[in-house]
Image: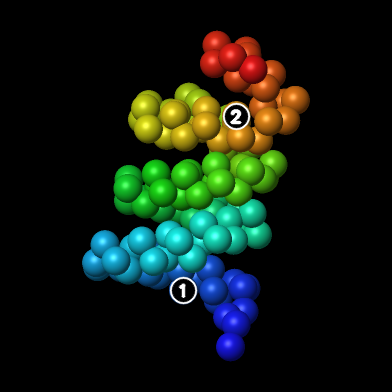
Amino acid sequence: MAQKIDASYFQSAMTLMRGRTANQQEQGFNMVLAHAPKFAAELVEEFRAETDHGLKCWLLELLTHARAEVAFPLFHEMLDASNLIYRDWAVTGLRKLNSKPAKKLLGDRGFGG
């Protein structure tokens, strides 16, 4: 029986990503990765609410795979983050968006277009 891909699926995946074992965490990550575009808005919300650095990095990584315009404001914001990993994921995310605004922003910030 196929699992329904909905809000409860996403929350189950996030619970696993916050799990105690690396296996649980990776299982949750892969659950979201398979459907990242569908959950882009939720991933942005989770990133903004999250306090764990490692999980925030994973959320940004998932957003780069989503290639969703809803992530543009977050990527834009993370270009100014003091955390270099967040900045790197923002650059990657903007490059994967491959939109005119993303290219312009990257060019304006010296990351190429």
Q: Is residue 62 visible?
A: yes
Indicate the quadrant where residue 102 lies.
top right
Closer to the chain start, of discs 1 and 2, is 1
Name the one closer to the observer, 20 or 45. 20
- The alpha-carbon separation of the residues under discs 1 and 2 comes to 30 Å
**What residue is drawn where x is 62% and y is 13%?**
108
Dot 1: element: helix
Quadrant of the frame with the N terminus: bottom right
Amino acid identity at mark 2: Arg
Q: Which residue is mark 2?
A: 95
Q: Which residue is mark 1?
A: 12
Amino acid identity at mark 1: Ser
Q: Pointer 2: residues within 10 angstroms few (<14), some, or many (20+)?
A: some
Residue 67 at what x, y percent from top left?
Answer: 63, 43
Q: Is residue 18 visible?
A: no
Residue 69 at what x, y percent from top left?
Answer: 69, 41
